Image (spheres, grey):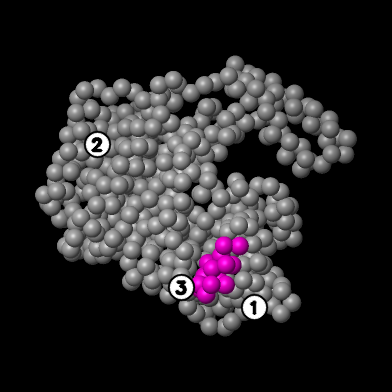
Amino acid sequence: MVAAFYSVSVGFVRLVLVTLASQKLTTKIVTFCLPLLFTLLLTLLTACQMLPNNPHIAATPTVSSQLTGAQKFSEKSRIQGHYLISRISASKNPSPSKFSGYYPLIDSSDAFASRSILTEMAQQTIDIQYYIWHNDAAGQLMLKDLYQAANRGVKVRLLLDDLNTNPELDQQLLAFAAHANIQVRLINPKVVRSFTPSNFVIALPRYQRRMHNKSMTFDRQLSIIGGRNIGDEYLRKDSIAEFADLDVLLAGKVVNQINDSFEDYWNSPLSYDIERLVRPSKNPDRNKSDEPFLGTLTAIAPINSQSHLHKSSQLYRVQNGAIVDKQLYNKKIQFRWQPMEFLADDVKKLLNQDDKDSRLVSQLRARIGTPKQQLTIVSSYFVPTDLGVLQLSKLMENGVKINIFTNSYESTDVPIVHSGYNVARVPMLKAGIGLYELKSSADADFRRKKRSLYRSKYSTSLHTKAFAVDDKYTFIGSYNVDPRSANINTELGVLIEDKVLAKSFHNTFDKSMLNVSYRVHLDDNGQLMWQTHDDKTNKKLITLDKEPHMTFVNGLWLKIFSALPFERLL
C-alpha cells in the first residue's frame, strides 16, 4: 500500500512541480521541495505506526543462566587476579581499592587492533555500546570477530543507537543476532524504518535525543571508551576521511562502573531487541550460506580473498600499521594506575525524565570545581553559548590560562555546527583565550569540489572529546562542549586524576601546533586572522585574513544559521 501510494504521489507531485517550474520557478527550488513533500506525504501514511509494546524478548532459562554464569565467572576471575587481566597487564595495581589503570589509544590502527585482539582473547562476555556502527570494512570485521567469539561460547551483547542504521545494516544485524550467544538491541528506535526522515516529524522530541555513548567491555574486566565509533574513518588510516580521535583502555575498579552503566542502558524499556523491530529480508540470496550472517560481509571480500576468513582481522591490523597488537599479545601493556571515576548520563535523559543535577556535565562541575591555573579543551564540536563565553572570560580574568582546539570549517564533518562556534570566536579572543583550529590534510582542489554545507567526507577531521584542568584532572570520553551533549544526547567518559597526564595534555599547545592547525587571533582592527606553518616545510609562518576554504555562499549560509534560534540543538 505504501509503495503504491508513494508511486502515485511521486507522479502527482512531479506533475505539479514541473508545471510550477515552467512558470519561471528554478529547478533548484523544485529539487529542494520534492523530497520535503515526499516526506510529508509518507508521514501521513505512517503516523499511525507504533513501536512494539514489549521491547524485550523473554530470555529462556538456559540463556539467562548462561549469561549469569558468565558474569559470575568473570567477576570471580577478576577477584582471583588471573585470566584476562593477568594476560595483559605488565604492571601491578598498587591499590586495587583506590586506583584503576588506563592506557591511551591515540592511533586509529591501535584503536582497531585493541578491540579486535581483546575480542579474540575474551572467554566469557563482551558488552558493546555505540552511537554509530558502519557497514564497511572496519564495521564488518568487528562483527565477524564478535561472531567468532560467540562460536567459542562468549556471550555477546551489542547495543546501538538507531539513528544511523539502514535497511542493509538492519538485515546484517538481524542475521548476526540469530546466533545463540548473541543479542542485539537498538535504543530509542525509529517508528518508521522504511523512511527515516518521517521519524523527525512523527516523534521529534524523542527522536532527536540520541545515545552518544561509546564503550566496549571484555569479560567485565577491561573496557575501551572514548570518542571513536565503529567504522573505517574511525579505525583505519587509509580511509578517504580519517578522524583524529582518542580512546582509552581501562582496567580495575572503574570497569565495574562501566558495567553498571551498560546494564542500565541494556535493560531500559527504550532498548528493543532487533527481532522486535526488523523483519527478515525476502531476498533468497541471504540464505544461500550455511551461516547467513557470513554471507552479508560483502565489504571485507577483498580482505578475505587475501587471507582465510578467520585471519582477515589480523591482515587488516598488519596493513593498518598497528603497534599495540604486539603489546597485547606479549602482555606488555603498561597501565598507569591512578584514581579515576567513570561518569555517564542516566538513560532517562533520552526521554528528558532524568534528574538534571545527575547529568554528566553537572557531575563534572561537582567533581572538578573551578579551574585555578589552566584549562585545555579539545572538542570536535565546540559551541560554548553566550553563557559559556562569559564563564570562560571570567576564568581568564582570574588568571586561568585557556587553550581550545577544535575543527576549522574546512575540517569539520558537520559544517552546520560551525555556525554555533564562529559567533563566539571574537568575544573569546578579546578575553585572551587561545583558539586553534585543525587543518584538513586533504588535497585542496579535491576538497573544495566535494565540500557541502552539511557534511565533509574527504579530509582529516578532529573527533576527540577531552579536556584537562590544572595539573590534576583529565577527562576523556564522548562528551563535546556543546548544548546537545549537555542537554539532549547521553554521554560518558572517565575523569582521571593524574598530574603527568594533565601536564602532557596542556603541553601539546606548543609551536608544533601550527604544523597541524591554524591559530586564530585578532589584528589591530579586531578582524579575525588565521596563522599557520606552510604544509611543505612546516617552518614558514603564513597569515591569512580570510577563513580558510570558506566560500561566499557557505559563509552566507553560516551567517543565516547563526542568526536562527538553533543553538540549543547544536
Q: CA distance from mark 1 to mark 2?
A: 56 Å
Numbered badge on residue 155: 2
Numbered badge on residue 543: 1
Q: Position of residue 115 (x, y in %)?
A: 31, 51
Q: Residues within 10 Å of mark 3 (few under 14, many from 20)?
A: some
Residue depicted at 27% across the width and 50% down the height: 255
Element carrying mark 2: strand
Judged from this view, the residue extending furthest toward the right is 23
Position of 359 compared to 567: left or right? left
User: Which quadrant is the N terminus positioned in?
Assistant: top right
Position of 362 compared to 415: left or right? left
Instruction: Between residue 236 and residue 40, name the one nearer to us.
Output: 40
Residue depicted at 29% across the width and 43% down the height: 259
Q: Residues within 10 Å of mark 2 (few under 14, many from 20)?
A: many
- Which badge, 1 or 3, is on the more N-terminal residue? 3
Q: Does residue 452 appear in the picture of this structure?
A: no
Is residue 21 on the magenta stretch?
no
Q: Position of residue 39 (x, y in %)?
A: 65, 30
Instruction: Between residue 57 and residue 439, name the one nearer to us.
Output: 57
Q: What amino acid type is highlighted by mark number 3?
A: Gln
Q: What amino acid type is highlighted by mark number 2?
A: Lys
Instruction: Between residue 291 and residue 63, name the one nearer to us.
Output: 63
- Which badge, 1 or 2, is on the more N-terminal residue? 2
Position of 367 compared to 560: left or right? left
Residue depicted at 18% across the width and 51% down the height: 84
